[in-house]
Amino acid sequence: MLRTTLRVDGKPDYTLVLPADEKYLDAVKNYLDIDVFADAMLCDIRFKVPYIGELIRDTDCPAVEDYNDFAEALEDIWQQDGALLTYAAVLEAERPDTLRGACELLQDLDNYQRITEEAYGYGQQRLQETLGLDDEGHL
């Protein structure tokens, strides 16, 4: 769901793909010779759907664990028809200022409904084109 580069002095950069389980995350920390991910600098964070990443305006500096929680929640809706479009619309409307806020919106997605009436057809079509999704909301 997302990819980030971890940078630690004296080690080659490491590309971390999230979500990941605890065993893998522990192996990455061992490889980088760090105790906690806070000892590494996160660089070049890329989302599988770039538009989602652009809608998240994080003013904090989220931890790897926060990104992992978000990636897990995003993966949960990935195959649900229209859920990604609904989430993009929620992000656009709510404009969370932290990754945690974006994750909370994602976990509360059932509380939102996309309006797909004729008047909103053009906007929905443009959003699908921007996200690169088909009519069902899939890549």
Image (spheres, helix red, strand yellow):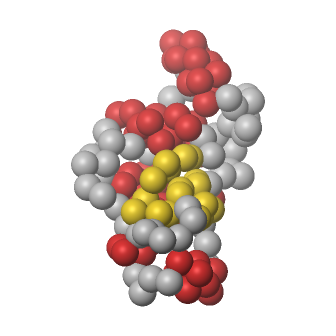
71 horizontally vs 139: left or right: left
Task: Identify the residue shown where x is 69% and y is 31%.
Answer: 133
Residue 122 x %, y % = 57, 13
> Which residue in the rendered view is the most extreme toward the front?
10
x and y percent of residue 36 in the render? 40, 82
**What residue is drawn where x is 41% and y is 37%?**
55
Where does residue 26 sit, x and y in percent of width and height? 56, 85
136 relative position to 118: left or right: right
* Near-viewer residue (70 or 7): 7
Q: Is residue 38 above or below residue 104?
A: below
Location of the C terminus by quadrant is top right
Quadrant for residue 37, please give it. Answer: bottom left
Position in image of residue 27 (x %, y %):
61, 84
Q: Nearer the viewer, residue 110 or 21?
A: 21
Residue at the image point whose x is 57% and y is 65% from the top: 12
From what the image shows, is residue 91 above or below residue 40?
A: above
State the count of labels: 0
User: Where is the N terminus found, in terms of image quarters?
Assistant: bottom right
Q: What residue is rendered at 33% in x and 42% in y?
A: 57
Q: Is residue 27 left or right of residue 43?
A: right
Q: Quadrant of residue 39?
A: bottom left
The answer to whether any part of residue 139 appears in the image is yes
Residue 72 showing in the rendered view? no
